[in-house]
Image (cartoon, grey):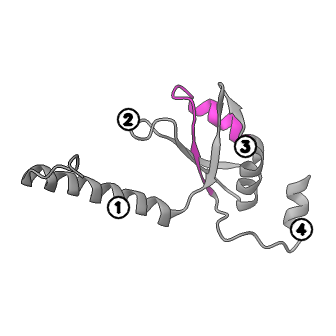
Amino acid sequence: MATISLRKGNTRLPPEVNRVLYVRNLPFNITSEEMYDIFGKYGAIRQIRIGTNKDTRGTAFVVYEDIYDAKTAVDHLSGFNVANRYLIVLYYQQAKMSKKFDQKKKEDEIARMQEKYGVSTKDK
């Protein structure tokens, strides 16, 4: 298998490789059992968290026990078709995720300030 030869060699993984995967473009009605079936083929899974909020539907986090299993899953499942939706499988990167949340907070604050002071952006 490719994963066995990858582990035996002294290969260095890219810095973004992580045990935690961020999965987008999932069908909204996917179950955790189906997720374990799809992702469990590539190694032992520690945890799967499926988004249930309005903002997080169609996304999930998959945590593998081994970093090499996570790399294999990303290599094989990116673009995989599930219920006529092509999965987007990425390595979770905390810095990028926190920037998105910070940006959303800033946009919300700007919108509140514009509403408070009666400023409209339509004039521009």
**Discs 3/1, front:** 1
Q: Residues within 10 Å of mark 1 (few under 14, many from 20)?
A: few
Indicate the position of residue 26 as horizontal and vertical percent values: 57, 35
Count the numbered circles shown: 4
Q: Earlier in the sequence, mark 4 or mark 3?
A: 4
Mark 2 and mark 4 residues within 8 Å of each other at the beta carbon? no
The structure residue drawn at horizontal position 75% and vertical position 69%, both measured from the top left corner, is 13
Q: Earlier in the sequence, mark 3 or mark 1?
A: 3
Residue 102: mark in rendering? 1
Residue 54: mark in rendering? 2
**Residue where numbered disc 3 is placed:** 77
Q: Amino acid at mark 1?
A: Asp
Q: Is residue 112 magenta?
A: no
Residues in magenta, as a range: 20-40
* Residue farthest to the front, as pictured: 124
Indicate the position of residue 92 as horizontal and vertical percent values: 57, 57
